[in-house]
Image (tube, helix red, strand yellow):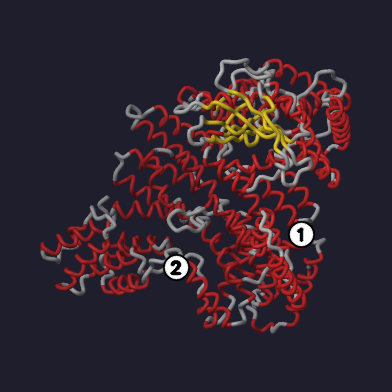
Amino acid sequence: VNMFQYGAEDALGKLPNRDKTLFKDMVTAYENKQYKEALKKGKKILEKHPEHGETLCLKGLVLVSMNKRREGEDIAKQAIYKNMKSFLCWQMYGLMFMAEKEYAQAKSAFKMALNNHKGNLQVLRDVAALEAHLRDYDSLVETRRQLLQAKPQIPNYWAGFGIANYLKGEYEEARKIMDSYLLSFNESMKTNEASEIVQFQMMCLLKENKISEALNFLIEKEKTFADQTILLENKIKCYTHLKNNEKAIECLEQLRERHPENIDLYVQILELKGIKANVELSKEEEEKAIKLIDEYIQQHPRSMNLKLMKLKFLGGEAFKKACFEYIKAFLIKGVPSLFSSLKIFYKTSSKVEILQKLIDENLQSLKEKQTFEGEEELQDPTIYLWMLMFAAQHYKIIGNLEKALELINEAITHTSTLPELYVIKARILKHLNKPDEAWRTLNEGRELDLADRYMNARTVKYMIRAYSTHVPLKEDEKEKEKEKEKEEKKEEKEDEEDTWQKREEKERKEEEKRDLLERAEDVMTLFSRDHREGQLNVHIMQCMWYEIEMAKAHFLKDQIPKSMQMFKYVYRHFHNIFNDQYNYHGYALRRGNFLAYLDMIEATEKHYQNNYFAEACLGMIKCLRLYSKDEKKYIEMQKTLKMSTKKKDDKEEDDPDAKLGDIDFYDIQTEKNPYQQIISLAIEGLKHNPKFKELHFEAMDLFIESKKWGQAIRSAIFLKENHSNLSQTKECLEKLATEFGKCDKTKINKNFLPEYEKEIASL
Amino acid sequence: LFVVAMGESGMHPLVFTEMSAKVIGQVKALNAAVFPIHYDDSFYDSVLATPHLTRLAYHRGILVGAACCRLEREANQPSKVYIATLGVLAPYRSMGFGSQLLREILTMVQSLGGETVTQAYLHVQVNNDEARRFYERHGFCVSHEIPNYYVRLVPADCHVLVKDLTSAGPSSSA
């Protein structure tokens, strides 16, 4: 990709030819990532033309790409100041910001480039991608219009313009553009392209809520649709909306034939025939439903989903009979997920009673006679085993943890080689508040199959949770421990017999003394080893569950710098993932996958609305606040974080990710408002996760302390509306009222003061 | 994977595999449940060195039986196979799994290239009538007794059961 196709020659008009070639070589070297080469060429040019703006800018860009951020930025800034009219300089300045992921600044740099060189297509394309990335749809439409006007013969530019209008909300415009697109390129278009466009137009109509028009459009363009499922789904949507139940059911039946295992379709059909879901039904309605489902079961006799659905409508003896058949099928097939599929019935107490009876009767029958209750046929021993497992899960969910433990222990004695049993036992122990026993049990299960990644991950999580519950020993207890160890060492010397037992005992004791978090890391390493560095690759793999667990554990144990580092990783991951989509804006259009592109845009709207992100923000705020008053500890934390992110062969390079979410502690003490950066974290976290109450509590405390009354009031309103019954809410509200009362009202902006007073009074 | 074509119940044939380091925990758990003797890490290390001499038996997805053996080659003497452990979890006995496992081992041993294995032998505690009868049904005979063979068991004596593998003699029952 030659980034300087358009107009570079003109910009370099002042340079003699030899140097122009050097410059072009420098550009090629940069694009091929041969940064040292590029710098060499640049040096040669600068020897003769030390003030040449474009070379200096390019040098800055190359330095930034080599991770020498500060140096590069300085050089480029100086060059720009002296060459504000050079579009090439601005373009490179923009590319420099792109390398640092400063998208907003990159956009303004590119705009300056466009000011100086209107219609530069290269820059326009970059600007379009940036505007899409920053979700600035109004500008995006304008940019795309310019691109289309410049080159109307490129089909992708039409699609790009159409999509920009769709994203902005101009659905009718978008449709018209797509019509023109279809007209212009009809012959050369392939089936799936045409299908995508037609589907897009339908989406526009639906967004405008023109349902009957959409329906007519669908019927008219039926043949162009390549994806029958989408076509049928949307028809169903339209017919249902227009209350044309007959036609809707017809389409549902067609769709059902394509996807017979999709239970949602059956639910929809039943609803259209008058049987609503999640509602108390009358006897006739239940019978009607059962009749309909029976018809479907005849068509698909081996479908377990349909039988499960039927169970929802049965009750009493009929339920018992059908449920027994269902359970029997699962047990004979040896499928461990029997309990998961029946979980839905535990909301109805009558059904729970029936399940209890079924379990108790059959357990006894299988144990004594190896048959199901009321049957003669002898069953395989595994049937009893799966029954025991199911029974243990049943008793756990109804709250009888002792009985559940009893049953699962019996299962383990019966067949000690099945890992699933240990998972269930560990869960029961966890609920019995025995985290140490829980992780040991799970570890036993893990050792049965070292190739099982799930068991590995679960064990690590349980180990970290157990670590968090360990209370550190007090001084006198530590003394006792030391004395105990001395005595044991004396005993060892006396007893000379070195049996396997003593050896294994010794190994186990050594193992036990090790820090549980370290041992958890060891277990994690079995699946997450980075082959290059021999350490865990969890950060590169963005393994957030592990990072959050470790962060919380470290925090509970007062290891704040480590905790902060882990939270920061999670925070960075979210930003990195969001920024990763940057390349897709251009790529999707080139490939014509714009429906997938629109899906992606929609999905990323809620990208930061995520518990992990909220927890990360909350964790970082807590860590920073703990150290917000102690300068020494700040510097210490800064050092720890810098050291741990530096790789071994880094000489002068800065951490490439350091810019993102980096909170420079030195700034905090010089800033007028020391809390500014912590506050911006809080605001960001709350903006995306407004329902995360823990964040609200912490943030309110922060806002009150830093006298950000507006923010504090907002959080207070949320807490009052949704969590007014919690004692912590009341405490927060009281604190807000008292502090506001105490504070110096002259410092508050006069425009807001009456509003604040009103709000706080109403709380 | 070796699948037995014909099992006791045609619907769920036993599936045989060799031991691997990943599933050694399962075998340890099985042996701990079946045998009164503890086998320590060095035993499993040597077993892992010759995985082709092991057989794990899976019934409906669960490990129910395992067998580990050793080849013994003494100077100027024909090779023998020593069956170190062969066991089936208690709830799954009397279903023919033990027999299948034994047959697997003996077939595997006889199809080893490069040497002829003439004899198979193993130790059984003197009071373990059930085990002795099992091996006798498969053509083993009690050769002699070793007093105080077991360090920690009572009774400490064992029987040595031997089977001649060279003759095309009477095949195992069933």
Name the residue at 52% across, 75% down.
A638
Residue B29 figure quarter: top right
Q: Residues within 10 Å of mark 2 (few under 14, many from 20)?
A: some
- Give the camera-side residue of B128 and B44: B128
**Mark count:** 2
Please state the chain letter of the residue tagged with numbered disc 2 in the rendered image. A
Give the labeled residue for mark 1. Answer: A721
Asked whether the viewer can see residue A357, the reply is yes
Q: Where A295 falls versus A433 (above or below)?
A: above
Please tell me whether mark 2 sits on a helix, a strand or a loop. loop
Q: Where A578 falls versus B51 (above or below)?
A: below
Instruction: Indicate the amino acid at tag 2.
Output: Lys
Residue A372 figure quarter: top right
* The C terminus of chain A: image quadrant: bottom right
Q: Where A759 falls versus A34 (above or below)?
A: below
Find the distance from the CA under tag 2 to the CA under tag 1: 46 Å
Name the residue at 89% across, 35% down.
A353
Q: Are marks 2 and 1 in contact (CB under 8 Å)?
A: no
Question: Left or right: A229 with respect to A25?
Answer: right
- Give the camera-side residue of A754 and B88: B88
Q: Where is residue A625 in the image (x, y as percent from the top left)?
A: 63, 74
Give the labeled residue for mark 2. Answer: A646
- Give the camera-side residue of A12 and A158: A12
Please state the chain letter of the residue tagged with numbered disc 1 in the rendered image. A
